Image: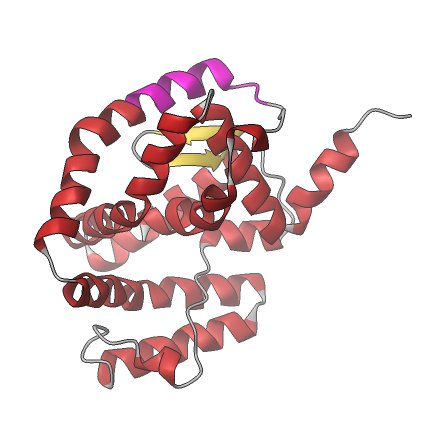
Amino acid sequence: MLRRLAALALLPALILASPGAARAERDPLEPVNRRIHGFNEQVRARVLGPLAEAWRDWTPPGLRQGVANALGTLSEPVSAASGLAAGEFGIAWNAAARFGINATLGWGGVRDRAAEMGYPPRPFTLADALCAWRLPSGPYLVLPLLGPSTLRDAGGLAAQGAALSQLVGSDAFLAWSTTDSVIGYAGLHETLARVAAESLDPYAVLRSAYLQRRAAACPVDRAAPEEDAPDQ
């Protein structure tokens, strides 16, 4: 669950990102953010990168996909509850249907039978619900290990994690979220390594990619730059 906001929201934008894609953004927390970004880069290079490469090299594609499918199925109740909270009943129904179908016909979620039956994945988090409630994003924020976020999205992520920890137990939640984060990172490893190697300022590229991706999904984030623009 924890990696979904960071990984799934980032991936499409990162693939399109280039050194020239970084835009000037308001970043009042930039000094702190850059230090955390540097720490994340060290963890990526020394710990997460080798883990991702070992996972890719030592496991067959079918197993990797099955584990990712099972973790996605476990996240569907989060999407259903968040969709209901946002009034997005189509998303809530889709998530509930996916969970029911994959937990039964999909061998506990290992096979994505729901997608085959016309219910594609539509991840939705509490952060997305806060966006639907038109809560401003607040400043850009880099989270230790989890990477790009905003004050609003990080708050939603923390509240979601606390609720799940109470619901399923802290040990089960920690095991689930850690596994989910590592597996999710494995899918981003090559892209992040390429951004770090090819960009003059990887921090600025990741910031721009994340904010553009969130603005594409969140109307209140799209409106913010226009409202902040100086009068002509």
Quarter containing the C terminus: top right
The residue at the far front in this view is 198
Q: Percent from the top left, x then y, of residue 43? A: 23, 27
| Along the line of sight, the residue nearer the viewer: 227 or 212 | 212
Residue at position x 62%, y 53% in the image: 133
Q: Percent from the top left, x then y, of residue 137? A: 58, 38
The residue at the far left in this view is 58
Q: Is residue 133 above or below residue 39?
A: below
The residue at the far right in this view is 232
208 part of magenta stretch: no
Please identify the quarter of the rendering in which residue 231 is found: top right
Residue at position x 51%, y 38% in the image: 17
Please identify the quarter of the rendering in which residue 188 is found: top left
Left or right of 128: which side holds 23?
A: right
| Main secondary-structure element of the magenta-colored stretch | helix
Q: Percent from the top left, x then y, of residue 205? A: 50, 30
Q: Percent from the top left, x then y, of residue 85? A: 52, 62
Left or right of 42: which side holds 23?
A: right
Q: Is residue 141 above or below residue 189?
A: above
Residue at position x 21%, y 36% in the image: 49
| Along the line of sight, the residue nearer the viewer: 105 or 96 | 105
Give, as a single range, the part of the protein colored magenta. 27-39
Count of all numbered marks drawn on residues in the image: 0
Scheme of image coloration = secondary structure
Left or right of 55: which side holds 211?
A: right
| Along the line of sight, the residue nearer the viewer: 166 or 41 | 41
Residue at position x 32%, y 29% in the image: 144
